[in-house]
Amino acid sequence: MIQKLINNIKKTNAPIVVGLDPMMNYIPEHIQKKAFAEFGETLEGAAEAIWQYNKEIVDHVYDLIPAVKPQIAMYEQFGVPGVLAFKKTVDYCKSRDLVVIGDVKRGDIGSTSAAYAVGHLGQVQVGSKKYTAFDEDFATVNPYLGSDGIKPFLDVCKEEKKGIFILVKTSNPSSGEFQDQLVNGKPLYEMVGEKVAEWGDQCMGDQYSYVGAVVGATYPEMGKVLRKVMPKSYILVPGYGAQGGKGADLVHFFNEDGLGAIVNSSRGIIAAYKQEKYAKFGAEHFAEASRAAVEDMVQDISHALENR
């Protein structure tokens, strides 16, 4: 699956991923009204609004991008109907030939970690049959519990040719409370990066590993270090746009071949119509605003890479 991600990036010339992280206050009133008219102001109504919102955005941007990243918490808050909307979104994006990165941030040990890995990336045994449950192509994983939490994911990745992105240095302001602490003279995030490289050597594709890393765009200097620590790992870079990251901040996340990183933007794209820059589209044409935001993001990153 890492090769499909790379092929999609080359085909679109757009090393970006759209975060499908819907909040009800992002969803235009006309979509909410239609969903509530059918299902009422219920969890089912909210889930239907989310699904219709996602679908329209995907229909307007799928030809420009290689991948999407739905954040499962935004769906889980609406209970079982929300989880069903998550699954419908995953399936629809895959039908559009997009790589799906499930932003699930799982991390546990033993059979629990194995169940997470099977549920999101593998096949679950039911009697004499096997089924794929959520069936994302990649999942985000928290490494805090060490190798015991990662190994079950590696096993599934090898079997299914799928991948994971391990949290190394996250984009939020307080990430340094733990991640920047020195351990034997090195910041913890660097030690985690070394483990990512080690785990990745066990799951190599043609050029890059199935094991990637999450490194925030808001910490470009740390990204520069981590790029060298993990030369064969793809880096998923959150924090672009709404969190302050710009194309010029991102050049060090990429290798000399122009590959090795994929940059995420969530509300900067899916709620673009709320920004002054794209307000001319209006709520009725929110997905057209999202397309314009994608085009601007691609141009920003391309320009930065050309001039690094």
Image (spheres, rainbow, N blue to C red):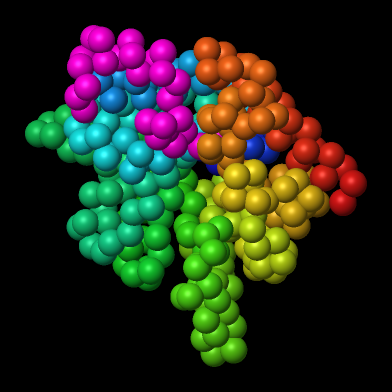
Magenta includes 25? Answer: yes
- The answer to whether residue 88 is seen in the rendering is no
**Which residue corresponds to the image point at 78% horizontal and 33% vertical from the top-left?**
299
- Left or right relative to 268: residue 298: right
Question: Picture coordinates of residue 169 (x, y %)?
Answer: 55, 64
Q: Quadrant of residue 144?
A: bottom left
**Which residue corresponds to the image point at 19% horizontal and 24% vertical from the top-left?**
42
Q: Does residue 125 lie above or below 37 as drawn?
A: below
Question: Picture coordinates of residue 102 (x, y %)?
Answer: 41, 40
Question: Picture coordinates of residue 232 (x, y %)?
Answer: 64, 56
Q: Does residue 56 lie above or below 144 as drawn?
A: above
Q: Does residue 8 lie above or below 147 as drawn?
A: above
Magenta includes 57? Answer: no
**Which residue corresponds to the image point at 32% horizontal and 35% vertical from the top-left?**
75
- Left or right relative to 98: residue 116: left
Q: Nearer the viewer, residue 97 or 243?
A: 243
Q: Does residue 253 lie above or below 14 as drawn?
A: below
Which residue is the extreme one toward the right?
307
- Left or right relative to 105: residue 131: left
Q: Nearer the viewer, residue 76 or 23?
A: 23
**Which residue corresponds to the image point at 33% horizontal and 63% vertical from the top-left?**
149
- The answer to whether residue 89 is seen in the rendering is yes
Residues shaded magenta? 18-43
Question: Picture coordinates of residue 204 (x, y %)?
Answer: 55, 51
Which residue is the extreme one toward the left?
127
